Amino acid sequence: MLSGSNWTAAEIGHITVEKDGFTCNCGRVGCLETIASATGIIHQVNEFIQQNPSSELSHYFQKKGEISTKDIFNFAGDHLCQQIIQRTADALGVVLANLSVVINPSVITIGGGLSKAGDAFIIAIEKPFKGMLWHG
């Protein structure tokens, strides 16, 4: 495990992935955490629901009044949820591939709420990860 001189190494949630993205809790804009975290997924849901009021997820939100990250993965057949899951997986896969070029890890461990998303999410991460991985 990397710790760094100030114990903040490997805090990949604050790597910028979208220069015009959501504002992060840290005050910066476009951090990975604004996309690839439970909070980030909910931000995406709110944005997509406003743009796609006829989706199954939008109807569910109107009934329930709130949506959790678990709901997104439960509705993985909904086109809106598929877009959110893929956007999240793409961002995380690209960051992990870039980090792999720099630190060449033998193992990558995914923690936090997304670690409970299941095998389908890990498979979704693998495609952008393998596509961006340097094989030097």
Image (cartoon, rainbow, N blue to C red):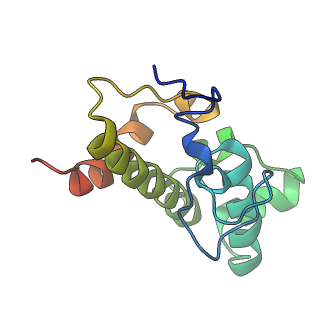
Furthest residue in direction left, as rendered = 136
Instruction: Give residue 47's position: percent from left, percent from top.
Output: 73, 71
For the N terminus, the quadrant is top left
User: In terms of depth relative to the viewer, which is nearer, 68 or 55?
Assistant: 68
Is 28 drawn above or below residue 101 in the view shown? Answer: below
Q: Position of residue 80 (x, y in %)?
A: 58, 65
Residue farthest to the right?
Answer: 65
The residue shown at (47%, 31%) is: 118
In the image, is 108 to the left or to the right of 88? left
The residue drawn where x is 62% and y is 32% is 8
The outermost residue toward the front is: 5
- Name above or below for residue 3 compared with residue 59: above
In the displayed structure, does residue 60 sit left or right of residue 128?
right
Occupied quadrant, residue 21? bottom right
Residue 88 in picture, x, y percent from top left: 52, 54
- Of residue 99 and residue 53, the one placed in the foreground of this image is 99
The answer to which of 56 and 9 lies nearer the viewer is 9
* Number of numbered discs overlaid on the protein picture: 0
